Image (cartoon, coloured by chain):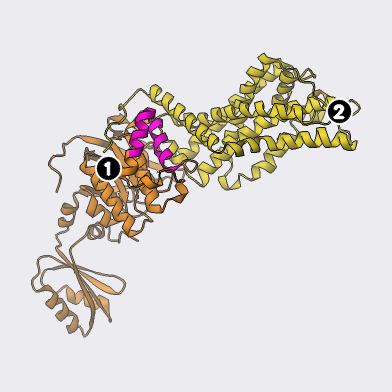
Amino acid sequence: MTSTATPTHRSTWQASRTALWALLLRDVTVVRKDFKTFILRTLIQPFLLCFVFLYVFPKIGQSVGGSKAESGFATVLVAGVVGITIMFQGLQSVALQMAQEFGFTREIEDRVQAPCPIWLVALEKIISGTVQGMFSAAIVLPIAALVHARGVEAAIHIHWLILLTLLPLAGLAMGALGLVIGTSFEPRNIGLMFGFIVLPITFLGGTYYQWDRLAPVQVGGWHWLQTVVLLNPLLYVNEGMRAAFTNVPHIHLYVIYPVLVAFLGVFLALGLRNFSKRVLS
Amino acid sequence: MIDTARSTDPVIVTRDLTKVYGDAGFTAVDHLNLEVQRGEIFGLLGPNGAGKTTTAGMLTTRVIPTSGSAIVAGVDVVKYPARAKQSIGVVSQVNTLDRALTVYENLYFHGRLFGIGATESRAIATSLLEQFQLSRWAKASVYALSGGMAQRLMVARAIFHNPEVLFLDEPTAGLDPQSRIALWEIMEELNAKGQTILLTTHYMEEADQLCDRVAIMDHGTLLALDTPENLKSSTGIDTIVTVKANGDLQELAQALMGVAGATSTRVTDKAVELQVSGGERLLARVIEATEQQGLHVQDINVAEPSLETVFIRLTGKELRD
């Protein structure tokens, strides 16, 4: 019998800290096991975007950058590519994981017996998603800088302070969005998430264009598109990445930081509430 | 027999523990008062919907009681769920193993989760794999395990952190007979080493064989609580004769009440069950009474009363209804 065991009744704070660490270790182990898949999964979309828009289009003479040179579009797109990478990582490592663990594997039932408050189990998933998102961003940026036709180069200027603060914030916000989605959809309906949430968010989230360029889209003088996309959290991530990686115009940082913090707060509150509801009865 | 070595040191205490679900006001557990002593195997026995799983859920912090209180290992599970979880191990009805990890890693990370260091977790994981005869599967994916092996691994995982109480919710449901017996042996071994176990079951054989004390539940309330022996002897019946015959079974039942010692009868599908207390030359008399009705005995079976008998006595229905 293995009667050498835990010191019983450590403080909840202490037990929670070690539990959080163990959950993170577990996630690192799982990612490491399937590292090749993780890399491929992360790179495939950014690679295709850059390949088609920055290599094929210039080669076949199809222009997407408006009147300006294609390099201008490349610069805009690079930031967007990093932005959606962070979003996808948040959805992949939080929403899809949750759906799987709630639905098919029921692993969550064991995980919530961990000696910590149950919200920490959900928060850990977000933290883990954030770390994976930041790592993904780091490997995606070179792709975007390398895959392009001659002369179609993104003008990358890294602003470290912005990068190092916005990247984690964006990761947390997107991970928290993943928690909301993963706990709102019935596990068997999680496929709908892509059609109803991911596609609109991606296409209307400033991935392929700067927000201030949307002004001409208007009805009776109302810049409706520019207004509507303000509800999209990904817009602030992408514009923020523009501020972090490039010198192109972007939504002011005084707006980006507080709005992302607000989105994070709302998503966390909703997601953790949903999570508790599903786990407890 | 109650183990005399067992101290009267309750490790689970519930006071008027109640759970009402939803707006419909379905009462799953109704003012339940239980005390489980340290070192015993305690069974919650009842049909589906009796409130066993809800009770176990409340004791393991997953179900929040509507009212009442529950103390497990000295901790109020409602007020301090995170703290209570340090001292409990849970094996749920469904397979909750981590599919992304190997058999060994499922154990190792559980240890880490409960604050056990890396070196010690490795050692405990290895020795548990051996103890539960899973060593050769250590590096396998949990997908490779059979139902019985997966269940063993879940038990190994649940006791990894040496919990004060091990909860098992219908642990042998869906297992083949061989795996079931293997799991019973494991529970007995663990208990012999002092592990307190609370299990829910609707298999009366399981409760009878395994449990020191059994709480019989139905509709969320406690109907009886005692050792299996005491529960059975409380019925006042010492023999049950089941007579299978063709013909009017109601009449047969009446006729059988004439047998000396008969206390009651019960007509089931194709047979009559006669409950007897201290009758002599029982079989001969039963056959005689049956044939006097002009019926032919097709099959006759003599058995001792079981927990099923107790349940029928208490509720008027069968456990498996």
Q: Colour of chain A?
A: yellow
Q: Quadrant of residue A111?
A: top left
Asked if labels 2 and 1 touch by Cβ distance under 8 angstroms, the answer is: no
The vertical placement of A258 against A49, above or below, is above
As helix, strand or loop, the secondary structure at mark 1 comes to: strand
Q: Of circles 1 and 2, which is in front?
A: 2
Residue at coordinates 62% horizontally, 21% vertically from top-left?
A261
Q: Nearer the viewer, residue A194 or A88?
A: A88
| Residue type, mark 1 in image | Ile
| Residue type, mark 2 in image | Glu
As helix, strand or loop, the secondary structure at mark 2 comes to: helix
Q: Quadrant of residue A68?
A: top right
Prevailing SS of the magenta stretch? helix
Q: Is residue B321 magenta?
A: no
Q: Quadrant of the N terminus of chain A?
A: top left
Q: Which residues are magenta?
A: B102-126
Q: Quadrant of residue B242?
A: bottom left
Which chain, by letter, is orange? B
| Residue at the spot of label 2 | A70
The vertical placement of B238 against B92, above or below, is below
